[in-house]
Amino acid sequence: MKRSGLIAAALGLAGLAYVLGPGKSRSPAPPAPVSQPLASRAVVKIDPAEVFRRAFWQPPGTGDQILHAERREWTDPAGLKRWEWFLVVEPSTELVKYLREDNAFGLVPVPKVPEMADAPPWFAFRPDEVDVLQAPHGNLHLFFSKTKRLLHATSSGMGFRPGAPEAVKAVPPVQSPSGRLPTRPPPIPANP
């Protein structure tokens, strides 16, 4: 009896190994964290106006003074795989209104500054001297200084991913009209 139980267990494990196959697992590996050390394949862009425009989806205003800006992009033959940017700005009143009052990106206040291991050396501030706003489902972080007119901002993402394939739309079959067709032609209008 014990022997048949062992054989059944062994067959069950063998079946499970066959279904999963070599190198497969039930759940996919978690994606690599976005905040990784800068790789050698990264392209660093430091055009301040371009980094600002791509960060805030608008060009810098006349009162916005960009102190530091950097955008890093990792690509492969298929395209952009990962990106991150860092900005330090003396914001104009209009930019502060756009980011805080209008809340253009749907940010929420958070009590704690997130860890940023690979930030450039110039992207430094004291955590207790900033108000932190963060995207609820993203990596956008804004750090408004409590004592100066200064904004630190950063975000990162995983680049472009192929979309889901579109479902093939079924074409409904042409249906013949149901019912009886008229047996005589329509009347012809009389000419006056």
Image (cartoon, rainbow, N blue to C red):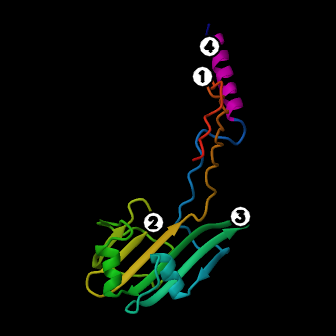
Kind of residue at badge 1: Gly
Callout 3: helix, strand or loop? Answer: loop
| Dot 1 crowding, Cα within 10 Å, few <14, some 14–19, many 20+ | few
Image location of residue 89, percent across then percent down: 40, 86
Any part of residue 127 in sight: no
Circle nearer the N terminus (1, 2) = 2
Query: Mark 3 or mark 1, which is nearer to you?
Result: 1
What segment is highlighted magenta in the picture?
Answer: 3-20
Residue at the outermost front position = 192
Task: Look at mark 2 in the image and give the residue it sits on.
Answer: 139
| Above-or-below relation of 160 to 180 | below
Task: Look at mark 1 in the image and give the residue it sits on.
Answer: 179
Kind of residue at badge 3: Ala
Q: Nearer the viewer, residue 167 or 181?
A: 181
Image location of residue 157, percent across then percent down: 53, 66
Task: Look at mark 3 in the image and give the residue it sits on.
Answer: 78
Q: Image quadrant for the N terminus?
A: top right
Task: Look at mark 4 in the image and give the residue it sits on.
Answer: 5
Q: CA distance from mark 4 to mark 1?
A: 68 Å
Query: Mark 2 or mark 4, which is nearer to you?
Result: 2
Could you tell me which residue is drawn at 57 percent across and 59 percent down? 32
Circle nearer the N terminus (3, 2) = 3
| Dot 4 crowding, Cα within 10 Å, few <14, some 14–19, many 20+ | few
